[in-house]
Image: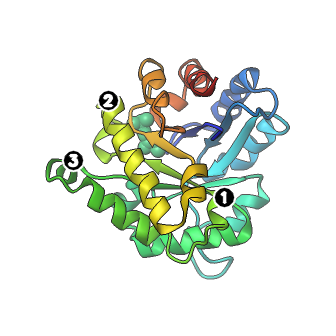
């Protein structure tokens, strides 16, 4: 069984008060690590330490939204994987479409970050997903293949135990336009098949593939109920406990 992951990507939101307060509310739902669901929150860098302290000992784990692929040096504005670990992160999100689009991150750069994160022992949520024009031009699978191939260069089958894939169709992010259950399942199935070809059946069977893009309490059960959807990467709805908790519950329900 693949244990579902419900991850909240807080993006450029929250503050030193609201971040820990949000975690305090989530702890009521997951007071201790659970074998039914893994819950991860990804606050902005300045609040990681505070949020990690608030989450300590509970079933809420903490991740960075990005990282740099060098340990130290003249890289103004960057944050190292080791620094994320130092302040209590177990996870890092890499290759988010907002970083690909707004910051021009290439698959090559993302791959350097993936390998660095794995080298230091951080678990990776690698995001992939097509633009609306790709979907309309029937290029979804080609785009996913390129991003998976590029993002996972020189990553071994053993290392894949620490990698989670997040399928986030760009046209569904922050737009309220969610992928249908069938569209999500089709893309996830394609990604799992790709993992089998690139690695092996064991890796394909064990790798969690999350869906992201306008996940809300009212569509979470349908999406998470798909056989190849192993959780959610949630943006807007992760900022309110009353929206995020029902999504966590949908994750638990999807495997019970
Ligand atoms: P929304 O849930 O706000 O659409 O954001 C999804 C996302 O980008 C998560 O990484």
Residue 119 rendering spot, x and y as whole percentages: 69, 72
Q: What kind of element bears circle 1?
A: helix
Q: Residue at x 46, y 74 (%)?
A: 109
The residue tagged 2 is 176
Mark 2 Cα-neighbour bin, 10 Å: few <14, some 14–19, many ≥20: few
Q: Residue furthest bottom?
A: 74
Left/right of residue 181 with respect to residue 82 in the rendered view: left
Q: Nearer the viewer, residue 83 or 130?
A: 130
Of helix, strand and loop, which one carries label 3?
A: helix
Q: Which mark sits nearer the N-terminus, 2 or 3?
A: 3
As drawn, the label of residue 132 is 3
Q: Nearer the viewer, mark 1 or mark 2?
A: 1
Report x, y in % for residue 220. 47, 25
Determine if the C-beta at disc 2 is less than 8 A from ligand 1.
yes
Give above or below for 35 relative to 71.
Answer: above
Residue labelled with disc 1: 161
Q: Residue furthest left?
A: 137
Task: Tell me the quarter of the picture where residue 68 sits.
Answer: bottom right
Of the residues under marks 3 and 1, which one precedes in the sequence?
A: 3
Q: CA distance from mark 3 to mark 1?
A: 31 Å
The residue drawn where x is 39% and y is 71% is: 106
Which numbered disc, 3 or 1, marks the residue closer to the eye?
1
Residue 17 visible (yes or no)? yes
Question: Rounded to the nearest whole Å, what is the CA distance between mark 2 and mark 3?
Answer: 14 Å
| Observer able to see residue 80 | no
The answer to whether 41 is drawn above or below residue 217 in the figure is below
Q: Residue at x 57, y 17 (%)?
A: 242
Look at the numbered disc 2 and give the secondary structure of its residue.
loop
């Amino acid at each position: 069984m693949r244990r579902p992951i419900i991850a909240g990507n807080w993006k450029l939101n929250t503050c030193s008060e609201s971040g820990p307060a949000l975690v305090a509310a989530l702890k009521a739902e997951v007071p201790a690590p659970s074998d039914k669901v893994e819950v991860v929150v990804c606050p902005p860098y300045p609040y990681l330490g505070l949020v990690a302290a608030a989450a300590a000992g509970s079933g809420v784990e903490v991740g960075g939204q990005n990282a740099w692929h060098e340990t130290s040096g003249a890289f103004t504005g960057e944050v190292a994987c080791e620094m994320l670990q130092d302040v209590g992160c177990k996870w890092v999100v890499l290759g988010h479409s907002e970083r690909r689009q707004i910051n021009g991150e290439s698959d090559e750069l993302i791959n350097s970050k993936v390998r660095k994160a794995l080298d230091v022992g951080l678990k990776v949520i690698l995001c992939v997903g097509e633009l609306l024009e790709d979907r309309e031009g029937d290029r979804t699978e080609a785009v996913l293949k390129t991003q998976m191939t590029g993002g996972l260069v020189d990553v071994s089958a053993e290392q894949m135990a620490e990698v989670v894939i997040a399928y986030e169709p760009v046209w569904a992010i922050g737009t309220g336009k969610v992928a249908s259950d069938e569209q999500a399942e089709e893309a996830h199935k394609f990604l799992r098949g790709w993992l089998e070809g690139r690695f092996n059946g064991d890796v394909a069977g064990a790798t969690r593939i999350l869906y992201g893009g306008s996940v809300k309490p009212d569509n979470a059960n349908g999406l998470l109920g798909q056989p190849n959807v192993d959780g959610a990467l949630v943006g807007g709805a992760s900022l309110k406990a009353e929206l995020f908790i029902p999504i966590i519950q949908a994750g638990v329900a999807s495997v019970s």
